[in-house]
Amino acid sequence: IVTTITDDEMVWSMRHGKEALINALQESGVGQVSDINRPSIFHPEPLDIATVQSFDEAIALQEKGLLRKTHLVPLELGGQDVPQNTFYLPKAAAIAKKEFDYHLQTLVRQGKIKGLNGNCQYRGKSVVPSAIQFSISGEAGFEHVLPVW
């Protein structure tokens, strides 16, 4: 049986074991139903991104599996794992960013892009970007906005 679990359920199971997670899923009433969009049994309310107002909070939420560490310029394309290139996204946005990164890698291998410029947009005091705007130059140049929240 394959069961889709949330990021924080995976983190929890790494500490407590897979049998304990299966028991917790059964006790919660979720059972072993695979629904990628279901809320976590540990955090049934969605994360209020507007309240994440420091990088320490974002890192703590990443360690709980509620946010994912992401790089503006992907490491695979020469980006560095430094604070200026690092930010934290909710799962769906992180997956969309990873898919965009794969697309960029393909275009780079084909020699169709020469440059990448990214700009994070923020709302209120949150350190989680509300959107990320990209400008790609070269033969396959284009603009792309990745909505986050």
Image (tube, grey):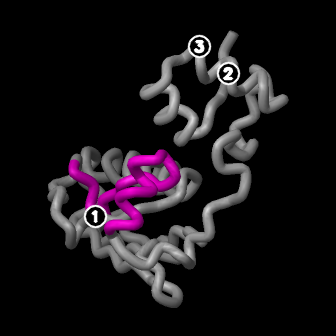
**Who is closer to the viewer here, 143 or 130?**
130
Asked if one can make out residue 72 in the rendered structure from this viewpoint, the answer is yes
The residue at which mark 1 appears reads as: 86
Farthest-out residue, right: 29
Against 123, is 142 above or below? above
Tell me the kind of residue under disc 2.
Thr
Mark closer to the chain start, 2 or 3: 2
Quadrant in which the N terminus is drawn: top right
Q: Is residue 46 left or right of residue 129?
A: right
Q: Residues within 10 Å of mark 2 (few under 14, many from 20)?
A: few
The residue at which mark 2 appears reads as: 3
Q: Which structural element holds mark 1?
A: strand
Mark closer to the chain start, 1 or 3: 3
Q: Is residue 62 left or right of residue 10?
A: left
Against 59, is 65 above or below? above
**Residues under labels 2 and 1: Cα distance?**
31 Å
- Quadrant of the image occupied by residue 134: bottom left
Q: Is residue 74 magenta?
A: yes
The residue at which mark 3 appears reads as: 19
Q: Name the residue: 47% across, 55% down.
A: 67
Tell me the kind of residue under disc 3.
Glu
Q: Name the residue: 52% across, 52% down.
A: 66
Q: Which residues are magenta?
A: 56-75
